[in-house]
Image (tube, grey):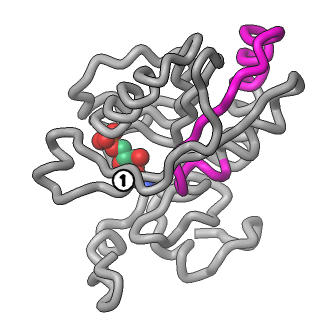
């Protein structure tokens, strides 16, 4: 695969079987989402809430595409065992720093798969009584969805394959690829890191 047009690690390029969305395609879509949000929240000073770390590229670009007053905050979660995860239980490792009661909140997500994680977090945020709560997701993997989620802002529908890049990782790798691509099967089965288990 040609890689000279991307300033990315050569050995990671070799793990990508296909580029699904180029940097330019992502930027154009994110700009359009920003325009929609500007239109809908002109006088509302929304709070954009993201979950670390996958959302960092999307959040940074989305914020820059919004030219009205806006605030941002982050939370961080870690999944429990696969069994608990299947029940939609996640552990809040870092909470928001600002109160959101009475605020117009936009929950910004990089990718939604089954919907269990975001469903848990939306319930948690709703309990804090924001004035409104909407979802803005960049990559929507509808095929495995278990929960009916209203997605106010949606970037791209993606197939049921594991994607990496633009903030999305596999075992903490590949986040800094500027595009989003499919991982080759062989790259998906690397042994876990002995120290971290990731
Ligand atoms: P859900 O609870 O919706 O099934 O899981 C969502 C989480 O799973 C995402 O926040 C992300 O961490 C992870 N995830 C699901 N699909 C993918 C994927 O294709 N690529 C990456 N990098 N993470 C994914």
**Image-based side of 33 in relation to 43, left or right:** left
Badge 1: how crowded within 10 Å, few (<14), some, or many (20+)? Answer: some
Image position of 108 (left or right of 113): right
> Residue at the spot x=39%, y=31% of the render?
124
Question: Which quadrant would residue 182 be assigned to in this image?
Answer: bottom left
Residue found at the very far bottom of the displayed protein: 194
The location of residue 176, given as percent across then percent down, is 63, 66
Q: Is residue 49 magenta?
A: yes
Which of the pair 105/169 is nearer the observer?
Answer: 105
| Left or right of 150 on screen, residue 113 | left
Disc count in the image?
A: 1
- The kind of secondary structure element at disc 1 is loop
Give the residue at x 47% y 70%: 172
Task: Tell me residue 63's x, y (percent).
Answer: 77, 37
For label 1, the residue is 162
Nearest the eye: 17 or 181: 181
Quick check: 121 above or below 46?
below
Q: Nearer the viewer, residue 120 or 15?
A: 120
Q: Position of residue 108 (x, y in %)?
A: 57, 34
Residue 64 within the magenta-colored segment of the rendering? no
Q: Which residues are magenta?
A: 32-57
Q: Position of residue 184 (x, y in %)?
A: 37, 66
Answer yes or no: disc 1 within 8 Å of ligand 1.
Answer: yes
Location of residue 76 with respect to 1 vertically, above or below: above
On the rendered structure, is 94 left or right of 194?
A: right
Residue at x 34%, y 75% (from the top left corner): 198
> Where does the N terminus fall, quadrant-wise?
bottom right
The residue nearer to you, when weighing 180 against 34, is 34
């Amino acid at each position: 695969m040609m890689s000279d047009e991307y300033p990315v690690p050569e050995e990671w390029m070799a793990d990508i079987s296909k580029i699904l969305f180029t940097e330019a395609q992502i930027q154009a879509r994110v700009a359009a989402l920003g325009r929609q949000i500007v239109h809908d929240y002109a006088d509302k000073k929304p709070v954009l809430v993201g979950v670390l770390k996958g959302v960092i590229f999307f959040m940074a670009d989305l914020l820059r595409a919004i030219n009205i007053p806006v605030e941002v905050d982050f939370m961080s979660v870690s999944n429990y065992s696969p069994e608990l995860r299947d029940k939609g239980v996640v552990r809040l490792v870092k909470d928001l720093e600002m109160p959101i009661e009475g605020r117009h909140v936009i929950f910004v997500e990089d990718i939604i798969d089954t919907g269990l994680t975001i469903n848990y977090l939306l319930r948690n945020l709703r309990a804090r009584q924001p004035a409104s709560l909407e979802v803005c997701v960049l990559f929507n993997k509808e095929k495995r969805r278990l929960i009916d989620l209203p997605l106010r802002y949606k970037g791209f529908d993606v197939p049921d394959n594991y994607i990496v890049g633009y903030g999305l990782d596999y075992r903490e790798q590949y986040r800094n690829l500027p595009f989003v691509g499919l991982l080759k099967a062989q790259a998906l089965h690397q042994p876990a890191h002995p120290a971290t288990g990731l």
